[in-house]
Amino acid sequence: MHHPGPPRFVSVGESVELAPRNPDPAGSYRWSVAAAPEESTFDAGDELSVGTPAGYPEPEDDENNKESGPVVHFHPDVPGAYAVELDAPDGTHELTVRAFPDERRDAQFSVAAEDLPLPESELDDTPISVSGPFNNHLMATDRPRRVGDDYVLDVRLLPGEHTAAFSVEDDLAEGVRTSVDVGGLGRPRVRLDASVDGDEVVVTATPKSAPDSGFSDADLPVEFYLDGRDDLGEDDVEIAGRELRVPADALPHRARIHAVTVGERRSIGDTVVLDATGSESVGVTRPNDPPEWAESPTVYEIFVRSFAGETLPTTFAEIERRVEYLQSLDVDCLWLTPVLASPTTHGYHITDYFDTASDLGSREAFESLVDRCHEADIKVVFDLVVNHASRDHPAFQLHAAGVEEYADHFRRVDADRNVVDVDWAGDDVPEYYFNWQRIPNLNYDSLAVRSWMLDVVDEWAGVVDGFRCDVAWGVSHAFWKEVRDRVPDDFLLLDETIPRDADYHEGEFHMHYDTTLYETLRDVGEGEKPADAVLDALDDAAWAGFPDSAVHLRYVENHDEGRYIDECDEASLRAAAATTFTVPGAPMIYYGQERGVPEQRGPMRWHDGDADLTEFHRALASLRAATPTLRDGSVEAVGYDVVDGDADAVTAYAREDENGRYVVVLNFDADPATVSLDDPVEATDLLTGEAVVAGDDLDVVDAVVLRAA
């Protein structure tokens, strides 16, 4: 079935990628507008053209003026509901696009000329790129203007903090980072639940306003939407306020109900799926929720070619021989950096998506490793790298050499956007993010590419338990929604989206990089922020619009980041690691973090690692595994006073649920702190088993976890 999937919820100013599912590269597809708001310039019957994705330069006349194609980028021009139609080989399919008012605001990035790495006299004739998440890190697309003593770029951005780099001579190594804080309020949220009431199924929406909103929860309106893939029409349902009712005997085999709410800003959508079994029962699932095993797992990331240590080459067999070590750390989920064929040590330059890297071992050896992990109750997630392919991949080589069948497989841009020293063949150049000249971007406007990458998903989704999706922000929402519907129900999708973005939770990913906590823990470790900022970082998820069920990957380092112990110190590393294990979400250990490995991707220190640091991580993981409250309980600040020590390096919070109440106290400083808590606690630190409370005073070296008295 080529139906494009669920309704889309967007804001004016955003584009919506529309693509047929299960695409046939040889098929004929046509997109058109079936209905539009009265104020829109779109009329019923208008054919939609390819357009330009958000984050890319718009056509000069600001129209969707490229040729028609099977994949289009629709730009709603006014708020309201649009109906778009796809004429496909299997019939005509209709999709609703609900556009809300533009949430962006005028903003400006600015860098002082004197802060740029060239004399001011040379700057006027020197190209400068401004790049960042706001333009998908595309170099040489946005250039600043000189205003007095500054270089500035005018942009429209959503509320929140945004970063950019001003790169002189289009050289990332000469980039000067800056940021702008755009005023505005957070996003509301909505949750759908369903139950059977007599002979009806009742779907109930529960909206929550943003923490800083002027709306109360009771003020928020709810909009329900049916799914065009299901045989359920508007005449079959009754909507009253926050309830949608449908007679059980009117349900098709499957019905997907969607809802969105709006305050000062729009929410992401939520979904319930109703499965009629042919009996009196109706199955209810919430596809935006994570698999049960992934609600709060301890994750261990391995940079695969460094894990065996200094002497042995790492292979699947060598990793398999060390699974017992993962068990000793109470690991629930193993994340492997790329294991597919690649000429590079890091593996992100894929040259064959359907075979494992020969130096790591055969597919059979990889599946043996997965089986061994499963025997140890450890799930396996591996890197899915589908934003780009290696320029050494035959597909790119054939594309570059002018083979017609591969002409549309990679995105092309004007030659003046080339920021590397490669003299690319042809009049234009492949598109790549940053200066990643060896990994050109795949073109998802091509049905052949979409079909190819969906085959990759199908190939491996039955082997592993989840994908960590590399550069998820570079691949379209429409593609990820199709992936989500394609993989098994208990399959985990983890996005690399920096900074994290709640839109990727809408029918796409279950787990997200917690970039906010990561950056905060770095700032605390470097003395740039007080330790109490940790609680503010946790609150940010609700402000950003993530539902409570979203899982956040809590990490202090990974393969792309410098080692915390190197950039800060061991004392702050211990407190930072303790934070990740004592807040909700999925704590992650990056291999070697627990052994004191100082190099970002250096060999695992098996024989000379830091034994005390390893035991500290082991104690954290063991306590979390044995204490449900540390995984599921609420988080709240507790009162405390630092009697002796650096007050800015100390913070405290409580975790509480029906299983009990626990108090966590962290000290990021190298010197011990003496702390007096407002909450009465038992004397024994649950991490060490030692008494740390004497009278009203609590001794904190790095982290303590205490049961409330």
Image (cartoon, helix red, strand yellow):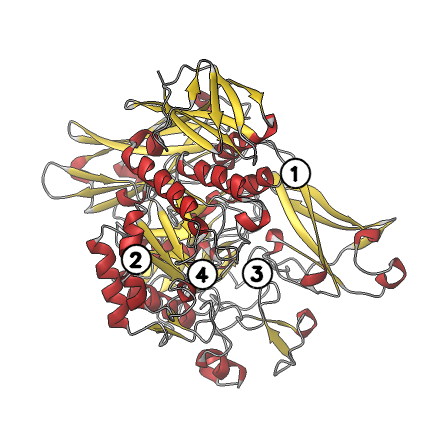
> Identity of the amino acid at label 3?
Thr
Reading the chain from its start, which is encountered first: label 3 or label 2? 3
Q: Is residue 616 left or right of residue 274?
A: right
| Numbered marks: total | 4
**Residue 649 spot, x, y in % from top left:** 57, 31
- Near mark 1 (Cα within 10 A), the count class, few <14, some 14-19 or many ≥20, is some
According to the image, label 2 marks what residue? 486
CA distance for labels 4 and 3: 15 Å
CA distance for labels 2 and 1: 37 Å
**Residue 696 spot, x, y in % from top left:** 47, 14
> Identity of the amino acid at label 1?
Val
Contact between labelled residues 4 and 1, with CB atoms less than 8 Å apart: no
**Residue 483 spot, x, y in % from top left:** 35, 57
Reading the chain from its start, which is encountered first: label 1 or label 4? 4
Residue drawn at x 63%, y 77% as measured from the top left = 428
Reading the chain from its start, which is encountered first: label 4 or label 3? 4
Screen quadrant of the N terminus: bottom left
CA distance for labels 4 and 2: 23 Å
Where residue 158 sits, quadrant-wise, is top right
> Identity of the amino acid at label 4?
Trp
Pair 4/3: label in front: 3
Q: Is residue 654 visible?
A: yes
According to the image, label 3 marks what residue? 52
Pair 3/2: label in front: 2
The label on residue 31 is 4
Q: SS of the residue at dot 2?
A: helix
- Near mark 2 (Cα within 10 A), the count class, few <14, some 14-19 or many ≥20, is some
According to the image, label 1 marks what residue? 182
Q: SS of the residue at dot 3?
A: loop
